[in-house]
């Protein structure tokens, strides 16, 4: 069951994890370059300093001459400073400065007497400042450069655009397995919120994707299933009426026989109503099942009113105190408006306690569309997926409950009367490789 979907999902998840790890390796390479470049710069800088101060660097002839000239000038200045002045009465006047200008420059300022310093004992002492309590605020520890780099190396992060590219493989795998578009969009949105723009440990990329995908798929089956046996037992006023709908060849009549057998095993009585008066040999087919199971069947001739047949079956059940009535309706294409109207008439007359859609699991998206249309027309309450045992894709099983908002009740897993399984979401998740 769902083998093909399981393989495709496994392959798609592996591709996504490889893509995420590839992104992480690119980030790691960038981080390594960042750590190497500063070292190279520092090494070059100190090497230059060492070369400069150790005198190993070569000096051009022009630089040598400039240094010699500076040395000579400095020696001459030093000699002039150290030479004593002879004859203090002689004043050396700069040839460009006039005597009058020099007199204007040298104006004598009035002499100021230094203020008296008071004795030490008269100086007032300053009040001792009280020590204020130091604040206990502590700055938050900041991650160092290398700590941040180490974190990048062990984790990876993908942006929304890159996620869309990586999700394409998973999206194609789901589409190939007949998963409804609404479900694909829901899974994509869930994974994006869990994976995109969030750090993921590089050793747990595939594990993280699997967990996010599993959580998303579990939400597809959030609607709790119905226990038919318990529902019938709990109803105070008998009978419990069940109407079955579906298109031709979907396994509807066989599924009715399986439900009847299940009720019989659980010590509940039932009667069959052959309300499919349209298809040739439909009454005979249901009669064969009734005979094998030793269950009473109510029938009219072909072309009679299907609602009248169902009404008579309910009347018989009330008279005989029978627990349940199972109504077999004619197979209708969901696109045939006139035949759908006939089903509406049956529901108005019989007022069933539960309306069950029976579809082929192997029909994929067609099965989902059929269930959606029947739900809009007559308002189904539950779903039986026949031929689930030969369904390798599983798109209908994953999609139909989410799209219609109705629970899957049973899987048909063979042709025998006991070949019916109560829906178990954990088993579905295991079959598609998410557990």
Image (spheres, rainbow, N blue to C red):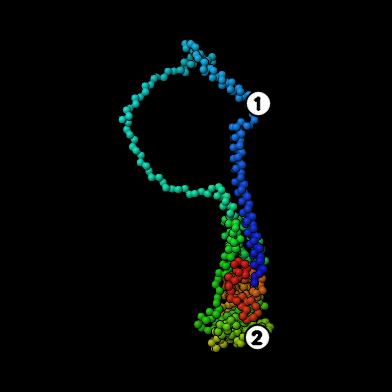
> For residue 275, what is the image quadrant?
bottom right
Q: Secondary structure at mark 1?
A: helix
Q: Measuring 63% from the left and 50% from the top, which residue is drawn there?
A: 29
**How far apart in space, not on screen, are marks 1 and 2 (Cα)?**
119 Å
Q: Position of residue 387 (x, y in %)?
A: 65, 75
**Above or below: residue 263 compared with residue 60:** below
> How would you rate the neighbour count of disc 2 (Cα within 10 Å): few for under 14, some for 14-19, many for 20 or more?
few
Quadrant into which the N terminus falls: bottom right
Label total for image: 2
Q: Is residue 357 visible?
A: no
Q: Measuring 55% from the left and 78% from the top, which residue is drawn there?
A: 228
> For residue 424, what is the image quadrant?
bottom right
- Residue at the right extreme of this rendering: 280
Quadrant into which the C terminus falls: bottom right
Circle 2 residue: 288
Q: Measuring 48% from the left and 49% from the top, which residue is drawn there?
A: 140
Q: Measuring 59% from the left and 37% from the top, which residue is drawn there?
A: 46
Q: Which disc number belongs to residue 414?
A: none
Q: Secondary structure at mark 2?
A: helix
**Above or below: residue 67 compared with residue 311:** above
> For residue 217, what is the image quadrant?
bottom right
125 sits left or right of 395 in the view: left
**Above or below: residue 205 compared with residue 105:** below
- Residue at the left extreme of this rendering: 122
Q: Which disc number belongs to residue 61?
A: 1
The disc, 1 or 2, on the residue closer to the chain's N-terminal end is 1
Q: Nearer the viewer, residue 179 or 310?
A: 179
């Amino acid at each position: 069951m769902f083998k093909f979907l399981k393989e495709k999902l496994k392959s798609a998840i592996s591709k996504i994890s490889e893509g995420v790890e590839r992104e992480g390796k690119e980030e790691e390479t960038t981080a390594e370059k960042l750590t190497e470049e500063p070292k190279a710069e520092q090494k070059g800088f100190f090497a230059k300093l060492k070369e400069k101060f150790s005198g190993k660097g070569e000096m051009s002839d022009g630089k040598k001459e400039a240094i010699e000239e500076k040395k000579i000038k400095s020696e001459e200045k030093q000699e002039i400073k150290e030479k004593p002045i002879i004859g203090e009465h002689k004043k050396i006047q700069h040839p460009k400065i006039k005597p009058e200008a020099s007199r204007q420059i040298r104006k004598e300022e009035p002499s100021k007497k230094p203020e008296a310093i008071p004795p030490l004992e008269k100086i007032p002492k300053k009040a001792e400042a009280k020590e204020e309590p130091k604040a206990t605020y502590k700055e938050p520890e900041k991650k160092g450069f290398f700590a941040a780099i180490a974190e990048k190396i062990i984790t990876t992060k993908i942006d929304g655009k890159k996620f869309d590219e990586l999700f394409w493989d998973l999206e194609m795998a789901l589409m190939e397995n007949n998963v409804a578009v609404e479900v694909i969009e829901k899974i994509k949105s869930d994974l994006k919120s869990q994976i995109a723009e969030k750090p993921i440990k590089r050793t747990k990329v595939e594990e993280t994707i699997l967990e996010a995908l599993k959580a998303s798929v579990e939400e597809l089956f959030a609607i709790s299933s119905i226990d038919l046996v318990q529902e019938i037992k709990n109803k105070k006023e008998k009978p419990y009426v069940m109407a079955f709908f579906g298109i031709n060849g979907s396994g509807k009549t066989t599924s009715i026989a399986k439900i009847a057998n299940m009720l019989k095993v659980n010590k509940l009585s039932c009667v069959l109503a052959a309300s499919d008066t349209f298809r040739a040999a439909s009454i005979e087919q249901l009669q064969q099942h009734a005979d094998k199971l030793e269950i009473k069947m109510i029938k009219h001739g072909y072309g009679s009113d299907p609602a009248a047949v169902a009404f008579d079956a309910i009347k018989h059940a009330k008279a005989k105190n029978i627990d349940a009535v199972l109504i077999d309706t004619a197979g209708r294409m969901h696109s045939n408006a006139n035949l759908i109207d006939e089903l509406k008439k049956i529901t108005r007359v019989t007022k069933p306690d539960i309306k069950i859609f029976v579809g082929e699991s192997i029909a994929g998206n067609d099965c989902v569309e059929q269930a959606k249309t029947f739900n809009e027309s007559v308002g189904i309450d539950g779903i039986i997926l026949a031929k689930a045992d030969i369904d390798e894709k599983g798109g209908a099983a994953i999609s139909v409950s989410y799209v219609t908002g109705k629970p899957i009740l049973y899987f048909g897993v063979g042709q025998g009367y006991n070949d019916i399984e109560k829906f178990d979401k954990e088993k579905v998740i295991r079959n598609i490789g998410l557990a």
